Amino acid sequence: MEITEIKIFPVNEDKLKAYVTIIFDACFVVRDLKIINGNTGLFVAMPSKKRKDGTFRDIAHPLNSDMRNAIEKKILNHYENELKQMSDSANKSLANLKRRDPDAE
């Protein structure tokens, strides 16, 4: 099973950094994974549902740590690349704006 597509949807919240959709083998989608900024850094939380007793239960999740690590590594790499592209794009737009109006800050 291979991740064939990753879509990152950044959010501007304190701990929640992005929602993620992944597609396996171009034929199976898993939505609503979350990139969370925890106490020891970023991690990927699986989609979950709140139960009647107030606890959360994963809807979909890897069955072993190797698969979990592989999914998390690929998603976090994609997330870092997405942030870099967003930053580069913002810097380019700012540079273009400054070229048009040298007094712009």
Image (tube, rainbow, N blue to C red):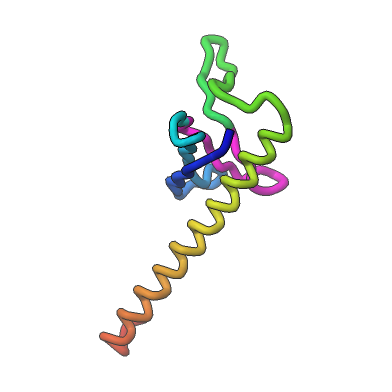
Q: Can you give x and y, in whole percent of width and height, for residue 17 in the image?
A: 52, 47
Q: Which residue is drawn at 46% across and 66% down?
A: 87
Q: Residue at x 53, y 24 (%)?
A: 48
Closer to us: 76 or 67: 67
Quarter-wise, where is residue 60 in the image?
A: top right
Query: Is residue 35 depicted above or below 29 in this figure?
Result: below
Q: Main secondary structure of the magenta part?
A: strand
Q: Which residue lies furthest to the top in this view?
A: 52
Q: In which quarter of the image is the N terminus?
A: top right
Closer to us: 1 or 53: 1
Magenta-drawn segment: 30-45
Is residue 40 highlighted in magenta?
yes
How many numbered markers are drawn?
Answer: 0
Query: Is residue 29 depicted above or below 58 in this figure?
Result: below
Q: Residue furthest left?
A: 100
Q: Residue at x 63, y 41 (%)?
A: 72
Q: Can you give x and y, in whole percent of width and height, for residue 9 in the image?
A: 43, 46
Q: Which residue is drawn at 48% across and 44% down?
A: 6
Q: Quadrant of the C terminus?
A: bottom left
Quarter-wise, where is residue 71 in the image?
A: top right
Is residue 42 highlighted in magenta?
yes
Query: Is residue 28 depicted above or below 8 in this figure?
Result: above
